[in-house]
Image (cartoon, rainbow, N blue to C red):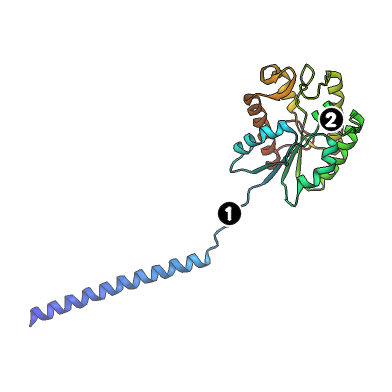
Amino acid sequence: MRNQDSVGMLSSIRSVRVHRWVHALLLLACAAIMVALFVHTPEKKELPRVLIIGDSISMEYTPLVAAQLAGQATVAHNPGNGGPTIRGMRELEGYLGDEKWDVIHFNWGLWDMYGWKYEKDDRSPEDYERRLDALVHRLKQTGARLIWATSTPICPEEEKDSGVLVDPATERLYLEAAARVMARHRIQVDDLHALMEPVRAQYGLSDNNVHFTREGYELLAAQVARSIVSALSGTSSAGEAQ
């Protein structure tokens, strides 16, 4: 009888312990569920949106910029070739769309200098400055942080498609016109002209071509990416050249 009583007591003790463990586990499970229900999980933050506006040169470096800023920003280019300022006046609203842009990195210039398919509009430095001023005024209304990309260098010979030879003095008139506009509006400047002018012979495709080699576009993309990061972080002052 004593042995049977002892066995019964041990069984009861074990049963109580098991029930206590089960009860404790249930309490822990309930607590975990309550925490999951009431602890707010932060939503994934949407990346800043960056729009690059420009001609075929920016079309080449934009994918490289997007790759460099992966995980930091979403980078897009305006549809097609931005061409001259007259095209910008006509198509800018379509470029902007309904999106909310955090940064807009933009350029018009070479097409104004060379006059490719210009629809017979005046492309003088004076009219270039007037149209560029109007474009900047509209871009400021977006509320985005604006970055002006100076036009990359002219080629030393007649440009292969237009047959036009732009001399350094004429180029300087357009660069100075753009500089006045950006100074008036206090726009951050990404000086791509200063970056590429000393190395144009090394990275230019040819003496009658304004485009660059892959290595040249990588150089451009690196500086463009830095200027965008600077704008996003607020470390670059308005009107400051990169």
Q: Quarter-wise, where is residue 64 in the image?
A: top right
Residue 160: horizontal and vertical position, in percent?
76, 21
Disc 2 target residue = 112
Q: Quadrant of the N terminus?
A: bottom left
Residue at the (13%, 77%) spot, across then down: 7
In this view, the residue in front, 235 or 93, is 93
Residue 9: horizontal and vertical position, in percent?
17, 78
Residue 198: horizontal and vertical position, in percent?
72, 18
Q: Please rate how many residues cluster around mark 1, counting C-alpha atoms within 10 Å: few if below 14, some from 14 to 19, many from 20.
A: few
Q: Is residue 41 left or right of residue 89?
A: left
Residue at the (40%, 68%) spot, across then down: 29
Residue 54: horizontal and vertical position, in percent?
75, 35
Q: Quarter-wise, where is residue 12 in the image?
A: bottom left
Q: Is residue 98 left or right of residue 38?
A: right
Q: Please rate how many residues cluster around mark 2, counting C-alpha atoms within 10 Å: few if below 14, some from 14 to 19, many from 20.
A: many
In this view, the residue in front, 113 or 220, is 113
Residue at the (90%, 28%) spot, across then down: 124
Disc 1 target residue = 44
Q: Is residue 228 left or right of residue 11?
A: right
Badge 1 element: loop
Badge 2 element: helix
Q: Give the amino acid at mark 1.
A: Lys
Q: Quadrant of the C terminus?
A: top right
Residue mark closest to the camera, 1 vs 2: 2
Q: Give the amino acid at mark 2.
A: Asp
Q: Earlier in the sequence, mark 1 or mark 2?
A: 1
